Image (cartoon, rainbow, N blue to C red):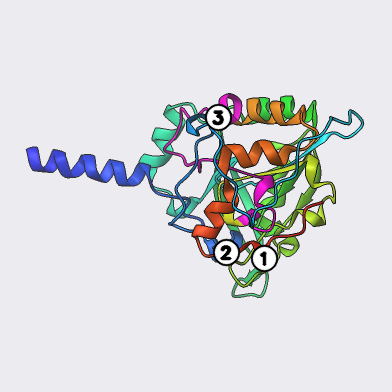
Amino acid sequence: MTWLSFLFQIFLQIIRATPSLINYNNYYSNSSSNEFEPLSVVELSESASPTPASVLIPTAGDVDPSKKLTVVLDLDETLVCAYETSSLPAIVRHQAIDAGLKWFELECISSEKKDFDGKPKINYVTVFERPGLDEFLTQLSAFADLVLFTAGLEGYAKPLVDRIDAENRFSRRLYRPSTSSTEFREHVKDLSCISTNFCRTVIVDNNPFSFLLQPVNGIPCIPFSAGQPHDDQLLEVLLPLLKQLSQQGDVRPVLYEKFHMPEWFQKHGIPASCWATPG
């Protein structure tokens, strides 16, 4: 019985750590890397480190009050986590709901797959909202222009975002066709398709390779799953940081000092030559 109890505990830990089980080929970008170690904003050192000669970081300027901060938000594992309903273990569902996670079920029409009669295939998805999501979007929209940028397909992402943003707080929504392919990663989110004012634009994404073209505009966040009912990243970590950035004339020096993403990309074999020219 002791061994059975021990194995059961291991099984629970595996289930809690299971990522979204939805079909990634249909809906998600599959460009995530297991090499990425999530960066926690609250744990990063504030001490400065030498800047490599190949990394050009602009100096901070005065805030132009007429220019709101543009915040580009990823969807999956940043704001929500989604599971293919038929593949979602009942134990995961019950634990997440009992712990208080907000959730809903969704019908998604596939633009790529057809049923046997030739009609678009309908997939059923269970979505869990990251704790504090609605309050996060409400407070953030008061001082920032919000853009949703996902590597998911529109047939999946649009009805999902309609549910979490009934108030239309996102001024724009971009889906997989808006992403770019590079020699290093596919489904990269090039911020130049949103704004040329990089000094007042940030992107929040659980997959840092999404913003490899503008590494000093990125905020890497901890991935969210249904096994994290007490997650506080949106309201306690990201919102205070974004409020701080809204007061900066140029967000890039602050983000560089916090995350040092250019060096992180260089360590992963992505040279500075692939980065977009700062604007």
Residue 135 shows up from this direction: yes
Write the start and end of the magenta stretch as one range.
210-237
Kindly identify the residue that appears in the image at 48 percent across and 26 percent down.
100
First of labels 3, 1 by sequence position: 3
First of labels 3, 2 by sequence position: 3
Q: Is residue 247 magenta?
A: no
Q: Quadrant of residue 164?
A: top right
Kindly identify the residue that appears in the image at 67 percent across and 25 percent down.
135
- Pick the quarter of the image with the N terminus: top left
Is 154 or 86 nearer to us in this picture?
Answer: 154
Q: Is residue 236 above or below residue 182?
A: above
Residue of label 1: 274
Q: Nearer the viewer, mark 3 or mark 2?
A: 2
Q: CA distance from mark 3 to mark 1?
A: 36 Å
Residue of label 2: 270
Contact check, label 1 and label 2, Cβ < 8 Å: yes
Contact check, label 3 and label 2, Cβ < 8 Å: no
Instruction: Tell me where residue 201 appears, x and y as whole percent.
Output: 77, 43
Residue type of the residue flagged with mark 1: Cys
Residue of label 3: 131
- Helix, strand or loop at mark 3: loop
